[in-house]
Image (cartoon, rainbow, N blue to C red):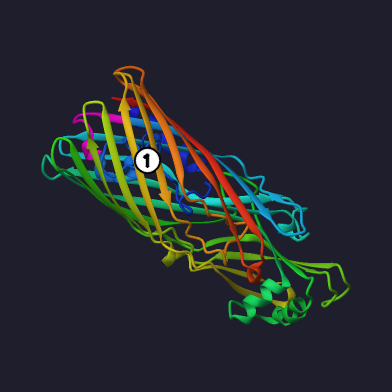
């Protein structure tokens, strides 16, 4: 009974406090759990604790029979993002620390393994002041996007060598956005058919777009790193398998479905039109409308993963994974609608082309047991940048590529252990072409995870 109460309390806390994460492999985490992350994110074919439900749920079947395990973790993501425009002071993002609780409980009972867990799936975000060039004098610029999961996995030993598994994932997403756009940027969208407006208030839009110095400002935020003003829920799922080729070699594979989230919606949104050019009335006048924003069909992608783990000797394990992340199907456009009863009624539908590419990720790691208590880990997560230079945005700089990781695990007693990982992400710099703004963005990271585990 005490165990049940502990699990319920932990997941209630996790649902309430699951935060928004920062971009790593696109918008996905570079690894789930410090055991995997310490090995470059490899996880397809070896026991990596409760984080298996976020990686490959079939590895739960590799647990020792008759054991239960509770993992409680905290992670920190610490990005450094600078956006540069010729002739302007550098804009340094103030979003430098994002903290993520996570946890899971799993049990192996004969051929069956099952559990429940809460994990942040990923996200991205930046924060600029009202004085930064990114904000165009309209107000603070801020983006926070996060997706989390409540996961229920089940794994079954079909034979002593073959495990098959699946999971049902309850998914929630949140978004904050404070975004300035010049009338020229909005006009280019309108000319390409990516910005339309209907209702009586739409008559004022051509006058606003006619002013070269006019600025539009979209604002919906709750100011928190642990939630989003616009939010939605939905579902996803996973399939997985592992197969022991022999005593030394295990192979694994997994498929993560695309999320099925509803549109992220909030009625507490504002759209301002800053009439610097005086095309709508007195120059310098700001017209602000209160209304409802919806982020239309924002999804996280399907992922395919393959991997192997080689137990080279009693103390050394080497793991190699490959993942294919399907960004192209879910990040073609960022679509946002705004509706209001102001100005006689206005409905605006805006699509910002993204055209992300699919991402190839290679995870390489090793674990070496130096003593019965201490295991050391190291690895690399090598990937391409999925964001085209022509559509990269200072508010959404999901451009980092490679991650280099170290980690360690220490057994405290027969029933408890701690694991930790540290991830260094070298700086990546991209420059948008002149037609897309001509700015450049630098992005690097230093991330960590810490986990306590208790066996029953």
Q: Is residue 323 above or below residue 425?
A: below
- Residue positioned 26% across, 38% down in the render: 46
- Towards the viewer: 204 or 8: 204
Residue 231: percent from the left, percent from the top? 53, 56
Q: Quadrant where the C terminus lies?
A: top left
State the residue position of label 1: 117
- Residue positioned 42% across, 67% down in the render: 329
Residue 360: percent from the left, percent from the top? 38, 56
Left or right of residue 352: residue 214: right
- Residue positioned 62% across, 56% down in the render: 395
Q: Which quadrant of the view contains residue 217? A: bottom right
Q: Is residue 238 above or below residue 409?
A: below
Q: Which quadrant of the view contains residue 256? A: bottom left
**Residue 452: in sight, yes or no?**
no
Look at the image and give the residue range highlighted in magenta: 60-69
440 magenta-colored = no
- Towards the viewer: 454 or 129: 129
**Residue 327: in sight, yes or no?**
yes
Residue 257: percent from the left, percent from the top? 34, 58
């Amino acid at each position: 009974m005490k165990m049940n109460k502990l699990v319920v309390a932990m997941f209630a806390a996790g649902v309430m406090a699951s935060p928004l994460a920062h971009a790593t492999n696109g918008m996905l985490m570079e690894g789930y759990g410090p055991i995997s992350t310490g090995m470059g994110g490899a996880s397809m074919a070896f026991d990596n604790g409760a984080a298996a439900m976020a990686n490959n749920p079939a590895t739960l079947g590799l647990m020792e029979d008759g054991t239960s395990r509770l993992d409680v973790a905290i992670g920190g993501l610490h990005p450094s993002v600078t956006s540069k425009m010729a002739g302007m002071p550098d804009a340094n993002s103030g979003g430098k620390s994002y903290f993520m609780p996570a946890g899971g409980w799993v049990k192996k009972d004969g051929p069956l393994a099952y559990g429940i867990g809460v994990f942040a799936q990923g996200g991205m975000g930046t924060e600029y002041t009202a004085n930064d060039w990114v904000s165009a004098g309209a107000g603070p610029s801020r983006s926070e996007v996060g997706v989390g999961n409540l996961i229920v996995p089940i794994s079954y030993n079909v034979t002593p060598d073959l495990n098959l598994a699946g999971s049902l994932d309850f998914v929630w997403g949140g978004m904050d956005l404070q975004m300035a756009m010049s009338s020229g940027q909005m006009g280019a969208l309108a000319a390409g058919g990516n910005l339309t407006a209907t209702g009586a208030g739409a008559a004022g839009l051509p006058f606003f777009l006619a002013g070269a110095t006019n600025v539009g400002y979209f604002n919906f935020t709750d100011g928190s790193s642990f939630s989003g003003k616009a939010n939605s829920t939905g579902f996803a799922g996973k399939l997985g398998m592992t197969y022991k080729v022999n005593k030394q070699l295990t192979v694994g594979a997994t498929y993560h479905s695309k999320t099925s989230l509803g549109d992220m919606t909030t009625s507490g949104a504002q759209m301002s039109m800053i009439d610097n050019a005086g095309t709508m009335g007195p120059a310098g006048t700001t017209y602000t409308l209160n209304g409802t924003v919806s982020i239309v069909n924002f999804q996280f992608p399907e992922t395919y993963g393959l991997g192997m783990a080689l137990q080279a000797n009693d103390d050394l394990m080497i793991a190699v994974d490959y993942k294919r992340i399907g960004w192209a199907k879910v990040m073609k456009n960022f679509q946002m609608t705004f509706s209001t009863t102001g100005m006689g009624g206005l409905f605006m539908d805006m699509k910002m082309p993204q055209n992300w590419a699919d991402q190839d990720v290679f995870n390489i790691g090793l674990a070496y047991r130096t003593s019965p208590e201490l295991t050391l880990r190291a690895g690399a997560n090598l990937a391409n940048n999925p964001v085209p230079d022509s559509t990269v945005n200072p508010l959404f700089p999901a451009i980092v590529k490679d991650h280099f990781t170290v980690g360690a695990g220490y057994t405290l007693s027969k029933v408890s252990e701690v694991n930790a990982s540290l991830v260094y992400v070298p700086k990546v710099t991209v420059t948008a072409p002149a037609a897309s703004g001509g700015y450049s963005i630098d992005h690097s990271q230093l991330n960590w995870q810490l986990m306590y585990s208790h066996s029953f």
